[in-house]
Image (cartoon, rainbow, N blue to C red):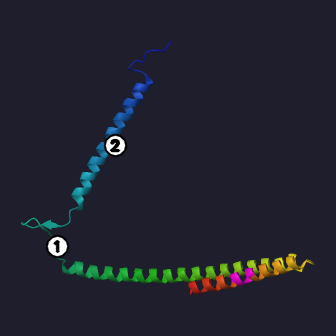
Amino acid sequence: MPQARSGSGSSGSTSRSKKSSSRKSSAKKTSSSSRAKSSRSTTRKSSSGRSTARKPSGASRVKSAADDARIEAVANRLRKLNERIIEAGREAGETTLTSYEKALKAIASGIEKGPGSSDIDWISNLATAQAKFIRDVTSSWTSAARNALK
């Protein structure tokens, strides 16, 4: 027979604790968002209701110039790093293309040496034509890819 649940059972207390913890977390979110809003205000509003930016003082102008110099130095370092990355990518692409070309030409040579050396003329001609096709396509494809890398 099913037993009646009482209010003091474990499942009832679990759901109550979940509800109270969700209330606490939503209260924390509300209080932290109100603090963030109050700390973000950096501009003043004039009597007309428009916000006006503060004019920098002499000390902040000097600080701004120093910040600009640091930002420019960081930008130059990033440009140099990007150039090195691009050059490394080109070198890796060239290496990959060379390996790919060698592999396909080795396959073409294998086709010519295997079935291409057959005593049956049509098999020999077919294998030789296939090997020639592979070499031609490989050469044109890799040269186009190398031009794209430049």
Magenta part, dominant SS: helix
Residue 11 in percent (x, y) is at 43, 26
Check the image and report above or below for 85 versus 23.
below
Q: Which residue is mark 1?
A: 54
Give the Cα separation between the discs numbered 2 and 1. 38 Å
Residue 32 in view (yes/no): yes
Regarding residue 102, the answer to whether it shows in the image is no
Residue at 37 percent across and 83 percent down: it is 72
Residue assigned mark 2: 25
- 127 in relation to 46, above or below: below
The secondary structure type at the circle numbered 1 is loop
| Residue bounds of the magenta highlight | 133-138
Q: Amino acid at mark 2?
A: Ser
User: Tag 2, which secondary structure?
Assistant: helix
Can you give x and y, in whole percent of width and height, for residue 94 in the image? 64, 82
Residue 12 spot, x, y in % from top left: 40, 25
Q: Is residue 58 magenta?
A: no
Whole-percent x, y for residue 5 in the image: 42, 18
Quadrant housing residue 141 = bottom right
Q: Is residue 18 above or below residue 78?
A: above
Left or right for 116, reference 88: right
Residue drawn where x is 16% and y is 73% of the image = 54
